[in-house]
Amino acid sequence: MTYRAPISEIQAAMRYAMAAASGANNAAFADLDDGMDASILDQAAKYAEGVLDPINRNGDLTPAVCRDGVVTTSPGWKEAYQAWIEGGWSSLSAPADHGGMGLPNVLNTACLEMWSAANMAFMLCPILSDGAILALARHATPELQQAYIPNIVSCVWPATMNLTEPQAGSDLNALRTKAERASDGTYRITGQKIFITYGEHDMSENIVHLVLARLPDAPAGTRGISLFLVPKYIPNADGAPGELNDLRCSAIEHKIGIHGSPTCTMIYGDNGGATGWLIGEENRGLACMFTMMNNARLAVGIQGVAAAERSTQQAIAFASERKQGRPPGWDGTDAMAPIAAHADVKRMLMAMTSMTAASRAICYLTAAATDLSHRAQDEGARQQAHERASLLTPVAKAFSTDLGNEATSIGVQVHGGMGFIEETGAAQHMRDVRIAAIYEGTNGIQAIDLVMRKLPMRDGDALEREMTDMRSIVEALKASNVPQFGNAADRLAETLDSLDRASSWLRAQIANAPNDALAGATPYLRLFGLARGGTALAQIALNASADNDLNAQKRIALARFFAEHICCGARGLELSICEGAASVHEAAIALLP
Ligand SMILES: Cc1cc2nc3c(=O)[nH]c(=O)nc-3n(C[C@H](O)[C@H](O)[C@H](O)COP(=O)(O)OP(=O)(O)OC[C@H]3O[C@@H](n4cnc5c(N)ncnc54)[C@H](O)[C@@H]3O)c2cc1C
């Protein structure tokens, strides 16, 4: 089934996010006035539907292969990448002083949703370049910027991210890849990296690896990690790719999903060390890599939204066609009704649609906050936006990919037995999105980041501002007196009360009983996502309610369903957070050897 870009939903979520992020400061997005966003979204949708979608299945059925270190991508991949270069898509939000268009991240995020929905495995290559551009623009020397950024912006040299090693996944303290200083100011890199997305492929003339490694005299732990730029081909004096660097891909992985994306084992330094250039300062590499990772975390959150959207479109189409049974009171002439007429199938479809819309709103809001963090005019507003983006990033990544996993699983369920049969394609969305909850920091690690680092940020100020914003939406919802919202305002008010109590409880545990706080981290992130997603949907519906058209009815129905059916689990999450730590810790007695 083909993918259709949901432009109207995307625009409604963008409008919400930009207004919510900028408040009175709406000049921050002035460059999107005059229909600029509509025309770019339209072009991006054409690339998604016309180029990426038709080869999505190729990637699943004919995965990338590695022979003697040469990786051949799936049929159609090279041509689609060439079209990506010609479209100049990587330049969308790249800084204008580095050859990019410098447009808001919220617009890029919206395009990314469409492209990832059309072909998640393909899009993993270009999205890593977005973060690399930012990391280099912020931390690299002018010479390094000049030699590499234009080639990454124009996409002719895509970038990769090399953190993971066999013994160092979530815990980068254990990283062992070595960097030795060379007499010419460069470094020699030696070691093995695993699971490197698009570490090797045949789509471009060069590949720029950003590699974390340790100097011989580096302090132990994450304070002793440096970041290096290690090109596949070392540029000649004229800037063109020259000699092959001392690195190779030794194998690629066989995976549950994203078969079209080569996941590579990379070997650096078989012959004395790959030549690398330092990015930022020695031993401060993790901070530089975080510039890239924060960008990538939002992009992964968007993969959750994208997979959910695509799976929902397919489930709705199937449920409208497939006939089984008759619901009570069915007055159709056929002996059997479309399954979409059954209450339980309607529930599944509403769950999928509302979960997609809620996670979309959170991701776009996070993107708009990152925009404000450098576009707002005064320093105070930039700082507050930066804190907001920091608070929301783990939620955007983990909540959206959790919901992406849930929605795509429901998508299979809607198809019945045919969902389990690969031919329908419903299972591919579920298999592809499974990784999104794992890479870029597992969702468990995101929850820890939210509770242990983001909640206490500025003594809870960022959280307090988020609560105030969400409470004001509930007040507006109550005041709106639109009967179609049903009990949404009450359910959302209860969700916020639960979030408030759980936040206070967790903040009290962080210093004295950190293991109890950690036991509640994942349910807390979920609760936060429900509150933020539920209130965002309510605001989007309030924005539309004056229109009284089909779109408005749809948005009100989604906001109501999400509040009444999904947010109503908030109290259970609160109990799990505030009263469930002891039973979590019993695992050590009950289960472990
Ligand atoms: C398809 C694919 C593509 C990838 N692409 C890249 C890439 O391009 N670049 C790159 O560098 N890496 C990449 N990775 C690696 C990925 O980021 C890691 O797999 C991920 O960070 C988890 O690390 P791990 O696999 O070692 O799991 P582990 O760290 O061993 O975690 C196992 C489990 O333990 C939990 N856990 C671990 N530590 C803690 C803790 N302190 N507290 C609570 N729970 C904890 C985790 O949440 C998880 O559930 C990729 C992986 C895959 C599979």
Image (spheres, helix red, strand yellow):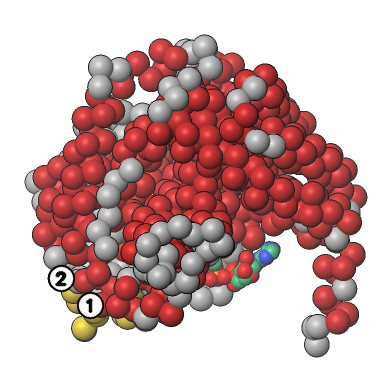
Give how far across and how far down residue 150 sits, in percent. 21, 40
Q: Give the quadrant of residue 332.
A: bottom left
Give how far across and how far down residue 324 sits, in percent. 43, 72
Task: Give the distance between the C-alpha atoms of the residues marked 2 and 1, in whole angstroms.
Answer: 7 Å
Q: Residue at x 52, y 12 (%)?
A: 24
Label 1 Cα crowd, 10 Å radius (few <14 / some 14-19 / many 20+): few
- Report the amino acid beneath label 2: Pro
Residue tagged by mark 2? 75
- CB contact under 8 Å: marks 2 and 1: yes
Q: Give the quadrant of residue 503.
A: top right
Q: Residue at x 53, y 40 (%)?
A: 557
Q: Is residue 90 above or below residue 189?
A: above
Give how far across and how far down residue 382 sits, in percent. 53, 21
Looking at the rendering, the quadrant in which ligand 1 lies is: bottom right
Element assignment for label 2 = loop
Residue tagged by mark 1? 62
- Report the amino acid beneath label 1: Thr
Q: Residue at x 23, y 41 (%)?
A: 44
Of residue 192 and residue 404, the one placed in the foreground of this image is: 404
Question: Can residue 347 be spotted in the picture?
Answer: yes
Q: Earlier in the sequence, mark 2 or mark 1?
A: 1
Of residue 206 and residue 16, the one placed in the foreground of this image is: 16
